[in-house]
Image (cartoon, rainbow, N blue to C red):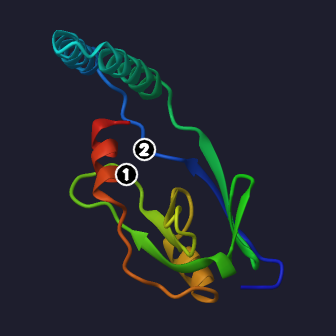
Amino acid sequence: MQENEMIRWEAPEAHHAPHTSDWYIALWIIAISASAAAILFANVLLALIILLASFVATMHARKGPKMTHYEITRSGVRMDNILYPYRTLDAFSIDHPFGDHPHFPRLILKSKKTFMPLISATLSGVSEHDVRESLLDHLPEEELRESILHHFLEYLGL
């Protein structure tokens, strides 16, 4: 990579699958049933938490993902206004979706920080080869996978 060369792209921060009205109806049937069960067991606080969580999930599912600006520079990887210097990163991987997933490949960065071990970025509108070659100058490539919880929440569309 040249001294001032950067790789830049913009992509949605996550895949967004619009939900049908059946999805929202099912969510609220489950939420109201669970809340009713909590009230029957004299746990009103749990019922309120379930209803609040359902409301938040509904609002989150309705809005689309925000567009994120990514840059790979000589000093690190930037996602919007956050720079992750190479000295704070251990490795990287390019994760390909499996099956008939409509998702784009994802760049996964392994951080040295304890509470933020994996950082991911959607590779949409940029060459995977260019990203890999650019990062190999600074970081080792390692097989990394996002957590099962991340995939489960993505499957639910959250």
Contact check, label 1 and label 2, Cβ < 8 Å: yes
- Residue identifier under label 1: 103
Q: Quadrant of the C terminus?
A: top left
Residue drawn where x is 42% and y is 37% of the image = 16
Residue drawn where x is 51% and y is 56% of the image = 124
Residue 80 drawn at (x, y percent): 70, 52
Residue 40 placement, left or right of 143: left
Disc 2: CA contacts within 10 A as few (<14), some (14-19) or many (>=20) = some
- SS at mark 2 in the image: loop
Give the mark, 1 or 2, whose residue is nearer the N terminus. Answer: 2
Q: Which mark is residue 89?
A: none
Name which residue type carries label 2: His
Residue 123 placement, left or right of 48: right
Q: Report which quarter residue 125 is drawn in.
A: bottom right
65 is higher (above) or lower (below) than 24:
below
* Cα separation between marks 1 and 2: 6 Å
Name the one closer to the observer, 46 or 139: 46
Name the one closer to the observer, 8 or 60: 60
Name which residue type carries label 1: His
Residue 53 drawn at (x, y percent): 38, 24
Residue drawn where x is 37% and y is 28% of the image = 18
Name the one closer to the observer, 27 or 65: 27
Residue 138 placement, left or right of 42: right
- SS at mark 1 in the image: loop
Q: Quadrant of the N terminus?
A: bottom right
Residue 85 drawn at (x, y percent): 70, 74
Residue 12 drawn at (x, y percent): 54, 45
- Residue identifier under label 2: 15
